[in-house]
Image: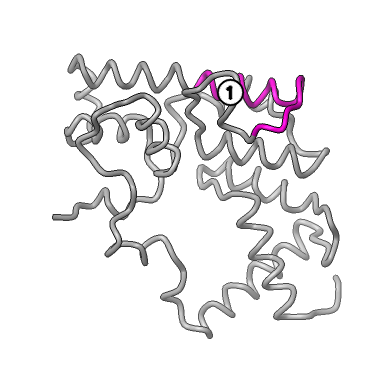
Amino acid sequence: MTTHWDTVPDLSALQMVCLAAGEEPDQAQLQKEYVNHLYELAAEDYGSACSQAMMHFLEPSNEPPGHGVVPYGLFSVRLRNTFDSALDDPDAIPVSDWVESSRAEFAAQKFSRADISQWIDHRGIQSKYQFSPPREHAQAYSDDHLSARERGSFLKIILGVALTKYGYTRGAERNSAVARIVEDLDGLGIPVSDDKIRSVLREAASRFPTSEP
């Protein structure tokens, strides 16, 4: 039997630990010892992930984010986006600045199902909820259901905004516009990875050539 939570791509820490404990997500659930234990564990491992992300730029390594010094780091969607943007664009907000800001507060984070699943496996938590999206709900995480005409319209709108408001440059190896779009969306509480934004903009630019503004 599927529930509303099966169609949610990213989950808050409260939602994550309540579902793992087999409880309906609600602030009152934190009064339960096991739920509170998971919440504190997640907060600790998120803090470890923040430290890993900052240390990467102080002591660069070949390890991908989420691996290395602390084995149970729990990366949030925003932390990963900030980390990836800093790798891609030297003018992007430094990871250390983001981590020290109010936007990095644990309670404000959302976590992808992939990162939650990895964290649960590493910690050996016996979760009562399956965080990987059920196959029958795979379409909920895809835009394949859009018609070609609808997708084309969305791409035109996205490209137009990127070109006129963010100074997006076609064909450039590095685009500061991508980092700025990531930052603005993150500030609105709707984080999207820089890889996704870059991919969509490249598709739009290739499909709809225009005169540069």
Looking at the rendered image, the quarter that the N terminus falls into is bottom left
x, y percent for residue 55: 69, 20
* Residue 161 located left or right of residue 107: right
Looking at the rendered image, the quarter that the C terminus falls into is bottom right
Mark 1: secondary structure: helix
Q: Which residues are magenta?
A: 46-63
Residue at horizontal 77 percent and vertical 65 percent from the top: 163
Vertical position of residue 188 compared to residue 35: above or below: below
Vertical position of residue 65 compared to residue 194: above or below: above
Would you say residue 54 sits in the magenta stretch?
Answer: yes
* Residue 41 located left or right of residue 128: right
x, y percent for residue 174: 83, 52
Residue at numbered disc 1: 50
Q: Residues within 10 Å of mark 1 (few under 14, many from 20)?
A: many
Q: Kindly report the secondary structure that dominates the magenta region of the rendered protein.
A: helix
Q: Quadrant of residue 120?
A: top left
Residue at horizontal 64 percent and vertical 53 percent from the top: 195
Residue at horizontal 38 percent and vertical 35 percent from the top: 12
Residue at the extreme bottom: 149
x, y percent for residue 43: 42, 20
Q: Quadrant of residue 18?
A: top left
Would you say residue 172 sits in the magenta stretch?
Answer: no
Display colour scheme:
one colour
Depth check, front residue: 49 or 197: 49
Amino acid type, label 1: Cys
Q: Quadrant of residue 156?
A: bottom right
Residue at the extreme left: 1
x, y percent for residue 127: 24, 33
Vertical position of residue 109 compared to residue 40: above or below: below
